[in-house]
Amino acid sequence: MSQKSLNKVRVWDLPTRIFHWSLVACVIGLAITGTLGGSAMVWHFRFGYSVLTLLLFRLVWGLVGGRWSRFGSFIYAPQTVINYLKGRGKPEHGIGHSPIGAGSVFAMLAVLLVQVGTGLISDDEIAFAGPLTHLVSNATVGLSTNYHANIGKWLLLGLLLLHATAILFYLRRKHNLVGAMLHGDKTLVVAMPPSRDDTASRLTALLILAACAALVYWISTLAVPAF
Ligand code: HEM
């Protein structure tokens, strides 16, 4: 049997990893505060603004971030997905997001964006209203509130369960995806170009994050003060 050399490749740059684990913490915070309601809603808003900041950051990072974090590296043609499902994947499919994983990543990002977006124009008609409710009609606020409180959260929960199941499935097949999301590296039998993850790219990420946070802060100031 031939001895294949192993290559350690930086797959997830530090900004992507920090994005991921911050997102996990904030989504848990959102679920808890949303369930508690009452005065915990103050924190529900804070977590919501944080998630919006993270999502905006990830959208930009998907264009300029490390190689394997860029959307271009995990947008697959339908035929590629079919081939992958038939067991005819390519070596590079095991590095960043696979053709199947990519679908769930885009679905999670989209559902999270819609969940935060509808939160901005939701109103509990008691004490809390999203900062942009006064910019849309009452009918739109009603539809958004219904989606946000009764539909979106379950959709998100379903996708997160799928996410956890997929990770456990790979773990049972001796494929630990979590390690790479923690330390950034994968050990591969093929040599592949790494994601850029140096000081300059990390500082760029910080600047992008600061710009996204400033934009979200501005959105939060659009709320009409309650009297
Ligand atoms: C609220 C819970 C969670 C959310 C919202 C979430 C969301 C996401 C998103 C959006 C990505 C894509 C990352 C990117 O390309 O930027 C991702 C990937 C990943 N997540 Fe999560 N995640 C959650 C929980 C977890 C947990 C609990 C674990 C493990 C213990 C985990 C492990 C991973 C791994 C390993 C990947 C990379 C998958 C791959 O290699 O394709 N996630 N997650």
Image: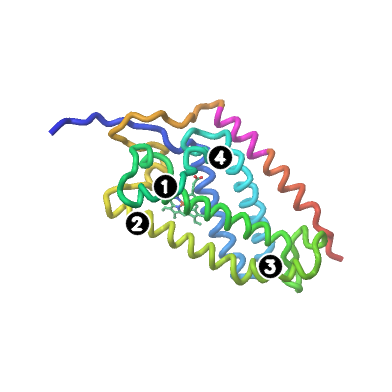
Q: Nearer the viewer, residue 83 or 145?
A: 83
Where does label 3 land, which residue? 39
Measuring from the top left, give residue 225's x and y in whole percent. 84, 60
Q: Nearer the viewer, residue 170 or 100?
A: 100
Q: Nearer the viewer, residue 102 or 132?
A: 102
Q: Quadrant of residue 6?
A: top left
Return the mark for residue 62: 4
Instruction: Answer with mark 2 or mark 3, whichever residue precedes in sequence.
Output: 3
Disc 4 to disc 3: CB gap under 8 Å? no
Q: Amino acid at mark 4?
A: Gly
Crowdedness near tag 3: few (<14), some (14–19) or many (≥20) residues, C-alpha within 10 Å: few
Report the predominant secondary structure element of the magenta stretch: helix
Foreground mark, 3 or 1, reads 1
Hey, which residue is sitting farthest left in the picture? Answer: 1
Where does label 1 land, which residue? 79
What range is drawn magenta here?
A: 201-210
In the image, what residue occupies the spot 37% across and 32% down?
9
Give how far apart the Cα atoms at labels 2 and 1 are.
26 Å
Q: Amino acid at mark 2?
A: Leu
Where does label 2 land, which residue? 168
Query: Along the horizontal axis of the image, is 12 left or right of 143?
Result: left
Instruction: Answer with mark 1 or mark 4, whichever residue precedes in sequence.
Output: 4
In the image, what residue occupies the spot 67% across and 53% down?
49
Give how far apart the Cα atoms at labels 1 and 4 are.
23 Å
Instruction: Answer with mark 4 or mark 2, whichever residue precedes in sequence.
Output: 4
Q: Secondary structure at mark 4?
A: helix
Measuring from the top left, give residue 125's x and y in whole percent. 76, 73
Q: Is residue 155 within the magenta segment?
A: no
Give how far apart the Cα atoms at labels 3 and 1 are.
50 Å
Give how far apart the Cα atoms at labels 4 and 2 are.
26 Å
In the image, what residue occupies the spot 51% across and 53% down?
24
Measuring from the top left, give residue 33's x and y in whole percent. 61, 65
